[in-house]
Amino acid sequence: MIDIAVVVVNWNAKDDLRVCLQSLARTSIPAVSAETWVVDNASTDGSPDMVRAEFPAVHLLVNQTNLGFSRANNQAVALSQSRYVFLLNSDAFVHSQALQELTAYADAHPDAGVLGPRVLNPDGSLQFSCRRFPTLGAGVFRNTYLGRLFPRNKYAQDYLMTDFDHLSTLAVDWVSGCAMFIRRALLDDIGVLDERFFMYCEDVDFCLRAGEAHSQVLYVPQAVVTHAIGRSSDKNADRMIWEFHRAWFEFDKKRHPQASVVRKMAVWSGLWLRARVRIAKRHAHAQRQKRLSDTSAGAADGTTSRSEGQTPL
């Protein structure tokens, strides 16, 4: 049986996908057998053709519509046969020895069901990829202006685990789905990603289910991955903002099935309002950037009038 099935879900991220697959090809090591699956969610940027031409050994599944992150991952998980499954974002790439480190740790710790590597931003800074489960306090301080007023509040710091150096192995609540290493036996036990989550929260939910099944979720920093957040989702930013907030509502409903109608309405109203504000702010920023760009272009060709140049941004 193959050691690892690496599953990469892609949507219109051809250039990042190429880098991701190149990194996997470079990390091929005799001690660990691996296969790679790419599930393309109806990309229009030529991603499937690129995979066929440049990575013929990769197993490629091409969906005719965008089925979402959870469902697309589950397609490859169902078809693959391996001791472990490594879910890896198309806008991420593995560093040398990452697969070997994850496999070695999992082999030595049979109680470990989910492993998360240390995740870095493209500039080399740390990405907070292991976190504690969200609380109401964390939600309030992370998602309202209170967070700006009190940036070092204990609720957000506790959620992000800023008290942890991220340099040692640690049992954690959950790890990011951008790079999630899963024992096949755990998938057989608790099931695959919950497809009610089109995108977002599927990682929180899966790790919570793993813990409930008495399987450890561990942060393993000796394995390293670099992740450029949002390269694919930013191509349809408004929808992804809605999906992010809808996912948290679905997660809350799933975890509190007996919640009162009042509570559900309060949660939904808060998330809906935050999503609307986020989208409005994004559009306002885009308009300011366009006006600034138009003003700069006009100044360069000498057509900008005095009044145009003084328009407040």
Image (spheres, rainbow, N blue to C red):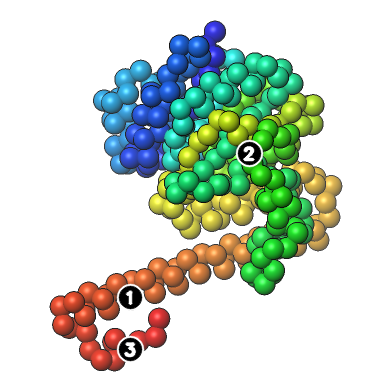
Instruction: State the residue at coordinates (84%, 47%).
Output: 258
In three-dimensional space, the C-alpha distance between marks 2 and 3, rounded to whole angstroms, equals 50 Å
Residue reaching furthest to the bottom: 307
Q: Is residue 225 left or right of residue 147?
A: left
Q: Give how far across and how far down residue 269 sits, in percent.
A: 69, 63
Of residues 283 and 155, the one nearer the viewer is 155
> Which numbered disc covers residue 29?
none
The residue type indicated by label 2 comes to Leu
Query: Upstream in the sequence, badge 3 or badge 1?
Result: 1
The image shows residue 272, relative to residue 35, as above or below, that is: below
Q: Quadrant of the N terminus?
A: top right
The residue where tag 1 is placed is 292
Q: Give how far across and how far down residue 260 sits, in percent.
A: 83, 55
Closer to the camera: disc 1 or disc 2? 2
In three-dimensional space, the C-alpha distance between marks 3 and 1, rounded to whole angstroms, equals 11 Å
Q: Give how far across and how far down residue 30 sits, in percent.
A: 45, 11
Q: Kindly tell me whether residue 80 is visible in this rendering.
A: no
Q: Kindly tell me whether residue 237 is visible in this rendering.
A: yes
The residue type indicated by label 1 comes to Leu
Callouts 2 and 3 close, C-beta under 8 Å: no
Of residues 176 and 263, the one nearer the viewer is 176
Disc 3: CA contacts within 10 A as few (<14), some (14-19) or many (>=20): few
In three-dimensional space, the C-alpha distance between marks 1 and 2, rounded to whole angstroms, equals 42 Å
The residue where tag 2 is placed is 167
Callouts 1 and 2 close, C-beta under 8 Å: no
How many numbered dots are placed on residues in this image?
A: 3
The image shows residue 71, relative to residue 302, as above or below, that is: above
Q: Give how far across and how far down residue 111 sits, in percent.
A: 74, 21
The residue type indicated by label 3 comes to Gln
The image shows residue 294, relative to residue 274, as above or below, that is: below
The residue where tag 3 is placed is 310
